[in-house]
Image: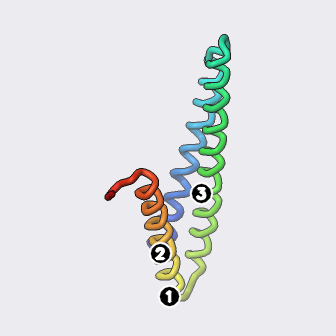
Amino acid sequence: MIASFIFGGLAVLSTIILLFGVPSIVLYMIKAIWATPMQIIQNIFIIIFCAVFFTIVFLIFIVTLASSRELERAKDNNFVVGVFSSLTSLVALIVAVVALINGIGA
């Protein structure tokens, strides 16, 4: 089923991001300069941002992997259409919120 392949592909993509992203941030933090208070604050913000980002990517991995397995077992086509409809509305909601925050279209 195409839907399960799409969600499986998203799970693989998030795994690749995690596998290459976490070590690169660790290497950045090892090489970071911790001399002045501004550099310390900057490095702490980078650590917090990366931790939040990788947590979100990990949650996306879990959700897409579970969705992929659930869609493989689904026999009802209306269920699959409902999943895509809800996914589309969620993406539209995120785009609308970002557009409101950035002031696009005003």
Horizontally, residue 81 falls left or right of residue 45, namely left
Question: In terms of depth relative to the viewer, which is nearer, 67 or 40?
Answer: 40
How far across and how far down the image is residue 15, in percent?
Answer: 58, 49
How far across and how far down the image is residue 25, in percent?
Answer: 60, 30
Q: Mark 1 to mark 2: distance in Å? A: 10 Å
- Write down the residue under mark 3: 60
- Write down the residue under mark 2: 84
Kind of residue sitting beneath label 3: Ile
Mark toward the start of the polypeptide (1 vs 2) = 1
Marks 3 and 2 close (CB-CB < 8 Å): no
Marks 3 and 1 close (CB-CB < 8 Å): no
Horizontally, residue 78 falls left or right of residue 39, namely left
When asked about the image quadrant of residue 72, the answer is bottom right
Kind of residue sitting beneath label 1: Asn
Kind of residue sitting beneath label 2: Phe
Name the residue rendered at 43%, 60% in the picture: 95
The dot on residue 78 is 1
How far across and how far down the image is residue 40, in percent?
Answer: 67, 21
Name the residue rendered at 66%, 40% in the picture: 51
The dot on residue 51 is none
How far across and how far down the image is residue 48, in percent?
Answer: 66, 37
Mark toward the start of the polypeptide (3 vs 1) = 3
Residue at the farthest top position: 35
Decide: is 102 above or below 95.
Answer: above
Question: In terms of depth relative to the viewer, which is nearer, 26 or 86?
Answer: 86
Decide: is 50 above or below 40.
Answer: below
Horizontally, residue 75 falls left or right of residue 1, namely right
Mark toward the start of the polypeptide (3 vs 2) = 3
